[in-house]
């Protein structure tokens, strides 16, 4: 064991080291103290783009701005746009609406909000092509797929130096007869182990066929805007869909990072992308 003499600079360094040990990715993360509009309605200033096929280049304009909203083409494209700034302790909101184009398959339209994005762009997901790129980044995904809005998925990837980032979370859940979890604030604390944590009223037996809905869905109907809220406070992430709390992640790591909007092959629009301070704790 190394012993240090008591000295203010050493004490400060030790405190900094402890802070990094708690969340080694929080150094550049900002906790907003006021409401900030992340999308200006004109262009993608303040955002980066990533596509599995072309990395940080977007020759096909998979991502664009049309009529004041973010447009993702879908089709063959897989990737995301991400804020340049990393955030912590925030209340993020956006609205999304499906376009006409799909990925050509029979299953539900799919997209997501990725929070606490950390590490190498394209460092997560199946790697394809000459560059061996993935489509995603280490993050916690708030699922937006039809009927699954609010499900939670841990996406694990690598850091810039190639080391693995052990992203993780847990949640209070109940187990239904179908063997899957549903969020339940009075349920059992369970560590994420590879299967997504379903939102509290995710329909049992839902076939996830294109343009179908669960009987208790709170997301808006096809062609209408759905509001998504993600409240990050410390290591807790709470998800609301159209004002209804549907899921919550606990013990989240990393507990800060960039925020991304996914293109998973289905045409989708985003608007009213705003971040603000996390609400104060309830008395």
Image (spheres, helix red, strand yellow):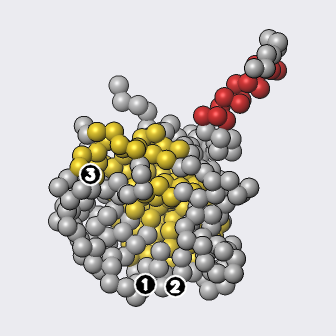
* Above/below status of 259 relative to 186: below
Label 3 with label 2: CB-CB less than 8 Å = no
Q: Is residue 28 visible?
A: yes
User: Looking at the picture, how far across and down is residue 126, in whole percent?
Assistant: 55, 71
Q: CA distance from mark 1 to mark 3?
A: 28 Å
- Return the disc, 1 or 2, that comes first in the chain's sequence: 2
- Return the disc, 3 or 2, that comes first in the chain's sequence: 2
Q: Determine the secondary structure under disc 3.
A: strand
Q: Quick one: label 1, few (<14), some, or many (20+) residues within 10 Å? A: some
Q: CA distance from mark 1 to mark 2?
A: 7 Å
Label 1 with label 2: CB-CB less than 8 Å = yes
Give the residue displayed 71% in from the left and 30% down from the top: 17
Give the residue displayed 24% in from the left and 73% down from the top: 207
Q: Determine the secondary structure under disc 1.
A: loop
- Left or right, residue 98 beside residue 2: left
- Left or right, residue 57 beside residue 248: right
Q: Determine the secondary structure under disc 2.
A: loop
Indicate the quadrant containing the N terminus: top left, top right, bottom left or bottom right.
top right
> Which labelled disc corresponds to residue 76?
2
User: Looking at the picture, how far across and down is residue 274, in whole percent?
Assistant: 50, 55
Q: Quadrant of residue 16?
A: top right
Give the residue displayed 77% in from the left and 26% down from the top: 13
Label 1 with label 3: CB-CB less than 8 Å = no
> Which labelled disc corresponds to residue 182?
3
Residue ranking furthest to the top: 6
User: Looking at the picture, how far across and down is residue 48, in whole percent?
Assistant: 65, 66
User: Looking at the picture, how far across and down is residue 103, in whole percent?
Assistant: 43, 84
**Count of numbered badges drawn on the protein:** 3
Q: CA distance from mark 3 to mark 2?
A: 32 Å
Q: Give whichever of 68, 152 is nearer the camera.
A: 152
Residue of label 1:
103
- Return the disc, 1 or 3, that comes first in the chain's sequence: 1
């Amino acid at each position: 064991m190394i012993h240090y003499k008591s000295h203010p600079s050493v004490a400060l360094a030790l405190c900094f080291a402890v802070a990094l040990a708690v969340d080694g990715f929080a150094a550049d993360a900002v906790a907003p103290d006021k409401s900030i509009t992340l999308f200006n309605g004109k262009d993608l200033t303040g955002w980066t783009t990533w596509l599995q096929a072309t990395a940080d280049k977007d020759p096909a304009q998979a991502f664009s701005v049309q009529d004041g909203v973010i447009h993702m083409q879908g089709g063959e494209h897989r990737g995301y746009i991400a804020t340049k700034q990393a955030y912590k302790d925030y209340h993020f909101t956006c609205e999304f609406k499906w376009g006409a184009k799909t990925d050509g398959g029979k299953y539900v339209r799919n997209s997501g909000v990725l929070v606490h994005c950390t590490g190498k762009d394209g460092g997560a997901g199946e790697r394809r092509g000459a560059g061996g790129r993935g489509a995603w980044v280490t993050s916690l995904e708030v699922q937006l797929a039809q009927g699954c809005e609010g499900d939670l998925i841990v996406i694990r990837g690598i850091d810039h130096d190639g080391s693995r980032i052990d992203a993780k979370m847990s949640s209070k859940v109940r187990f239904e007869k179908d063997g899957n979890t549903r969020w339940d604030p009075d349920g059992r604390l369970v560590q994420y182990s590879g299967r997504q944590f379903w939102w509290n009223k995710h329909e049992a037996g839902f076939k996830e066929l294109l343009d179908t809905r669960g009987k208790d869905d709170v997301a808006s109907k096809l062609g209408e805007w759905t509001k998504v809220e993600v409240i990050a406070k410390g290591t807790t992430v709470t998800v609301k869909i159209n004002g209804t709390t549907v899921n919550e992640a606990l013990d989240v790591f990393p507990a800060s990072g960039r925020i991304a909007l996914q293109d998973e092959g289905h045409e989708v629009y985003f608007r009213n992308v705003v971040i603000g301070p996390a609400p104060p704790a309830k008395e």
